[in-house]
Amino acid sequence: MKTPVPLTLTSTVVRLEPLTLAHADALTRVGLDPELWRWIPTPIVSAQGMRAYVATALDEQQRGVALPFAIVDATSGAVVGSTRFANIDVRNRRLEIGWTWLAGSHQRTRANTTAKRLLLGHAFDALGANRVELKTDALNEKSRHAIGRIGATQEGIFRQHVVCASGRVRDTVYFSILAAEWPAVRRHLDKRLNN
């Protein structure tokens, strides 16, 4: 697998552009809704917290284990969320798509599915990934359903996997898509997005 490097991925719905500290203010404006962070181990509750979130993502990029993006509405140019490649393992040809959140205004639209289609296409078609992983809180039924809807296979549950800021111990559900499965998943996503 090739090493992921910062780039912009575009569609008519959203644009994924390399995350920078310059995005922090726009992310703060759309990203402090407590419901966005309900299932995230450490919620973002302030502008300072959002800056730290972006800084951590950029530090992980420098270390070669993540490639974060700002999600931008392709029509308005407004920043509406964030996502990333994470847990990048070039040697074993795998990475994770995650840390995805969208402003309430863009939930239940084509934005998330389009962002996943862009990321999956880049991971498999450009980088040569063998495996893409996705995960979510076991209690987050909405996210579990959405990941399954894009064509990922649930593999299992890591019990008592993460201690959340609230003190709750989270079980994490893991999903994956393999390179051999990607052509069928791609057709499925393209059909969904073109209807």
Image (cartoon, helix red, strand yellow):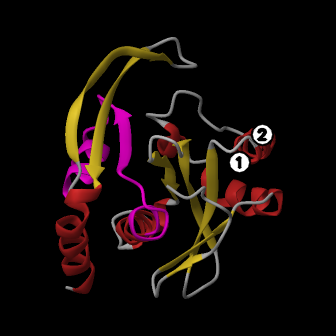
Answer with the quarter of the image where residue 57 lies: top right
Task: Provide the residue designation for mark 1.
Answer: 61
Q: Which element is circle 2 on?
A: helix
Q: Give the residue drawn at x 77%, y 56%.
A: 24
Screen quadrant of the C terminus? bottom left
Name the side, left or right, on which 115 lies relative to 184.
right
Q: How many numbered marks, from 0 up?
A: 2
Closest to the observer, 99 or 105: 99
In the picture shown, does residue 91 fall above or below 84? above
Mark 1: amino acid: Gln
Q: Which element is circle 1 on?
A: helix
Closest to the observer, 186 or 124: 124
Name the side, left or right, on which 192 lies relative to 78.
left
Kindly tell me whether residue 150 is visible in this rendering.
Answer: no
Residue 52 image label: 2
In the picture shown, does residue 180 fall above or below 183? above
Q: Earlier in the sequence, mark 2 or mark 1?
A: 2
